[in-house]
């Protein structure tokens, strides 16, 4: 049943946002402390980043599986299973003896984490009206930013006091607490839409049309920037300006602050002005291109401005993410494929993440940060062109 009481709607959104926040605490903590891990273990950035790359691959592949299952099985149970496994993997990481063991454990964690977002989207679409969904999905997306802020604030304190391993134990405790809250307060939905959906509607709204493939490519490009820049910005700041790892990690707090701003700004532009998610995504890609150009021009000259421009760039990618990951799947509600489409599109994000997480480390080590920043400019520009070119075809095919 659809929720109509405003208090119930707000509580529902807060519950999902808190769960999503904990999923980020237990997923991006590895990237947040990787510079400290390099310093402590003596392994290279590229060697330790294999675990991140592997987790992005399994997370992306798991999104497709999770999306399909979310249209057929209990979304509440899928999230519960994902949280339980991710807690176990966070406990195991500090016990690993080398980067290859970390790779194996974090790949499992990536797969477990994939059972969060598509089922949550299914829950929101099934329980909320279209207008309430647009508002709630922004609040739920806060969870990713708040989780990022929390881990980047807490990590330097824990690292300086207890070492990098304590960050994973802290994240696991948060996950255990969230499991109890989720089981107590989340109400499940009857999954019937995928069975009863009209066949003609499914045929009219193909998932793998040329238009949707273009959308998926744009999602890959935003994933390359959103997660790649977030992961390696502390290392870029530390190496370019000779700042300690703890200070550079702390500088990462500003990135999710801008992401929250861009969540709201992109939704406002979408609802009030542009009305087409691809047009809005194209605008944010273009703004990200400008930020990347400015970052390339001032690199090595001003650390604070470099952090600020990095935050603007990632914030713009979060705006793109809001449009392509959160808004596009809702147009498939009448064909009963909301969770499936959400999973497939979100999978594309982490194809981009896997490419950039290892690729940025490789390029920075081999050709330096100046070359690496040039690839950020090209990536944002290409993404903007795709969204602008396919905005009108998407509107006529899927929004009519």
Image (tube, rainbow, N blue to C red):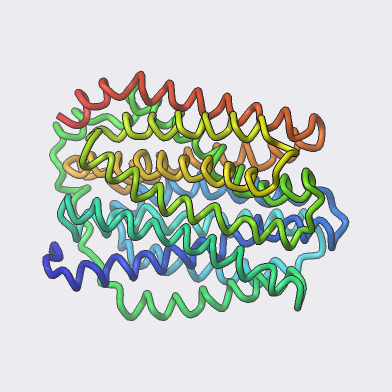
Q: Is residue 107 left or right of residue 114?
A: right
On the image, the x and y values in percent for residue 87 come to 56, 71
In the image, is residue 68 above or below residue 205? below
User: Can residue 308 be seen at all in this image of the molecule?
Assistant: yes
- Residue located 68% across and 69% down the image: 92
Q: Is residue 176 left or right of residue 97?
A: left
269 to 12, vertically: above or below:
above
Residue at (69, 68) in percent of width and height: 156
Quadrant where the N terminus sits is bottom left
Residue 342 lies in quadrant: top left
Q: How many marks?
A: 0
Instruction: Locate residue 250 relative to residue 241 in the image: left or right.
Output: left
Q: Position of residue 143 (x, y in %)?
A: 43, 62
Q: Quadrant of residue 88?
A: bottom right
- Between 386 and 57, the one nearer to me in the picture: 386
Q: In the image, residue 380 lies at what x, y percent?
A: 52, 29
Q: Quadrant of residue 152?
A: bottom right
Vertical placement of 327 versus 127: above or below? above
Question: Looking at this rendering, what residue extends furthest in the right direction?
Answer: 42
Asked if residue 350 can be seen in this view, the reply is: no
Quadrant into which the C terminus falls: top left
Q: Residue at x 47, y 51 (%)?
A: 258
User: Is 310 or 279 nearer to us in this picture?
Assistant: 310
Q: Residue at x 25, y 32 (%)?
A: 276
Where residue 217 sits in the image (x, y, percent)?
Answer: 46, 28
């Amino acid at each position: 049943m659809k929720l109509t009481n405003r208090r119930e709607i707000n509580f529902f959104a807060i519950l999902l946002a808190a769960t999503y926040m904990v999923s980020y605490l237990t997923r991006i903590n590895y990237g947040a402390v990787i510079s400290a891990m390099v310093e402590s273990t003596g392994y290279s950035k590229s060697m330790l980043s294999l675990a991140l790359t592997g987790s992005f691959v399994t997370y992306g592949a798991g999104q497709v599986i999770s999306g399909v299952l979310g249209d057929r099985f209990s979304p509440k149970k899928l999230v519960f299973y994902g949280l339980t496994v991710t807690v176990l993997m966070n406990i195991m990481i500090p016990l690993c003896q080398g980067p290859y063991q970390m790779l194996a454990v974090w790949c499992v964690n990536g797969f477990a984490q994939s059972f969060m977002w598509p089922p949550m989207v299914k829950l929101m679409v099934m329980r909320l009206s279209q207008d309430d969904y647009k508002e709630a999905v922004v609040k739920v997306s806060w969870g990713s930013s708040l989780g990022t802020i929390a881990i980047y604030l807490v990590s330097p304190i824990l690292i300086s006091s207890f070492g990098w391993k304590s960050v994973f134990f802290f994240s696991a405790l948060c996950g255990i607490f969230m499991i109890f809250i989720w089981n107590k307060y989340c109400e499940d939905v009857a999954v019937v839409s995928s069975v009863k959906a009209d066949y003609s509607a499914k045929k009219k709204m193909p998932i793998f049309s040329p238009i949707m493939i273009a959308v998926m490519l744009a999602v890959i490009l935003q994933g390359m920037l959103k997660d790649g820049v977030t992961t390696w910005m502390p290392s870029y700041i530390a190496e370019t300006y000779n700042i300690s790892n703890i200070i550079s990690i702390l500088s990462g707090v500003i990135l999710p602050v801008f992401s929250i701003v861009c969540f709201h700004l992109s939704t406002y532009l979408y609802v009030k002005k542009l009305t087409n998610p691809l047009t809005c995504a194209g605008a944010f890609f273009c703004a990200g291109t400008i930020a990347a150009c400015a970052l390339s021009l001032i690199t090595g000259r001003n650390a604070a401005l470099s952090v600020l421009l990095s935050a603007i760039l990632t914030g713009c990618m979060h705006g793109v993410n809001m449009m392509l990951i959160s808004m596009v799947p809702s147009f498939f509600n009448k064909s009963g494929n909301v969770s499936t489409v959400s999973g497939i599109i979100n999978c594309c994000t982490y194809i981009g993440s896997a490419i950039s997480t290892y690729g940025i480390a490789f390029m920075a080590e081999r050709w330096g940060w100046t070359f690496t920043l040039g690839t950020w400019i090209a990536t944002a520009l290409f993404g903007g062109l795709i969204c602008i070119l396919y905005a009108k075809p998407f509107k006529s095919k899927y929004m009519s």
